[in-house]
Amino acid sequence: MNMYSNHKLLFWSALLFFLFLTINIAILPAFQNQQIYKPLPDAKPLTKQEKAGKALYIANGCIACHTQQVRGVDMDTPFGSRPNIPSDYAVNDRTDFWRNTANLLGSERTGPDLTNIGARQPSMDWQLVHLYQPRAAVKESIMPAFPWMFKEKDFVEKGDVEVKVPPEFLKDKNKKIIATQDALDLVAYLQSLKQAKLPEGVAPVEFLYKQKEKKAAAGGAANLPDGGELFTANCATCHQASGEGLPGAFPPLKGSPIVNGDDLDVYVNIIMTGYTGRPGYGPMPAVGKNANFTAEMVTAIMNHERSSWGNTGKPVDVEKVKAIMDKIK
């Protein structure tokens, strides 16, 4: 019992025991993990701008509502093509000499997971509109707006990035909304968030508790996936669930001559490779290529769009879509 009455002996014993535990439980396993887990071959380190955006992501509390971890359960499939593995986070380097990297896994999903948001929603126009006023992009959104990351100007100057905000969300309809460097940096970081491909021959971890796959899309053949679900996951954020789009930002699909027309080559090319030629609207990214759409998925989406919101387009055959996609490749 001499140790308990000798404060020096008690202090040094406790300190040595603490250091022993720290080295064996925290430090050595961390070094071991760094040796075992290497970045995936396609993983890219953050650029200077993306690192600045990551710092803004942390400073503005985005981590409080968004996770960056696709769990191995089927309900997480909208957020990534596979569950995350330790190597997904190995590409990160130290914040600085004193601080280790912040892997922004998060613990809340008040908003959707952002692990693969750069692939799910690569449009800079959409990201900027959503940042300025989330309700302009997603009507039901509860995300706070970030107007201090934008400036109001009377006219657009050289080098300015104008944000196509629908008129009803503007305080002064005569003003132009210009993204600041902070807004551009934050969006650059969000666009960098993409799941890297696994090495060839390596099978991804399977999602658990899979739900029975739905078949028979609206207006389509029996072997197609659900076009409505695919549209909601990949298209509705810009074109809206109503198909009416956002005036001045994203074009409507309701009553669209492309959607209802017979020129399938143009239609499929827009879905797969994007489009930049429509006056008054921002460029559409290559949604199909970014999301690795198959011919069946494209056909299901097209049939959903052609049979929804009063559209009267004829059902599309998957073989015709396959032939067009082969030309694109």
Image (cartoon, rainbow, N blue to C red):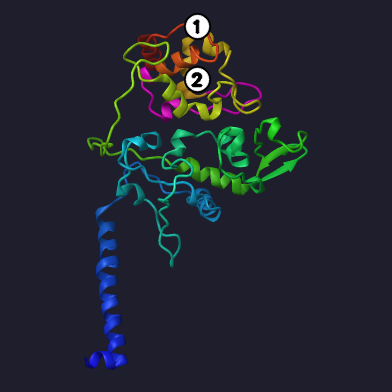
The answer to whether residue 328 shows anywhere in this view is: no
Q: Mark 2 points at which residue?
A: 270
Q: Is residue 131 above or below residue 102?
A: above
Residue 136 lies in the magenta stretch: no
Q: Residues within 10 Å of mark 1 (few under 14, many from 20)?
A: few
**Comes first in the chain, label 2 or label 1:** 1
Q: Is residue 283 above or below residue 312?
A: below
- The one of 120 and 268 positioned closer to us in this rendering: 120
Residue 289 lies in the magenta stretch: yes
Residue 40: name its quadrant: top left
In which quadrant will I find the N terminus? Answer: bottom left
| Residue 254 relative to residue 200: left or right | right
Specify the segment rendered in magenta.
Answer: 275-297
Residue 115: name its quadrant: top left
In which quadrant will I find the C terminus? Answer: top left
Q: Name the magenta segment's main secondary structure.
A: loop
Inspect the image, locate mark 2, and give the three-letter code of the amino acid beneath it.
Ile
Q: x, y percentage for residue 228?
A: 44, 21
Gap in Å between the C-alphas at discs 2 and 1?
A: 14 Å
Q: Is residue 226 above or below residue 39?
A: above
Q: How crowded is mark 2: few (under 14 residues within 10 Å), some or many (20 or more)?
A: some
Element type where label 1 sits in the image? loop
- The one of 295 and 61 positioned closer to us in this rendering: 61
In percent of the image, x 44 and y 29: which residue is there?
A: 233
Inspect the image, locate mark 1, and give the three-letter code of the amino acid beneath it.
Asp
Q: Mark 1 points at which residue?
A: 262
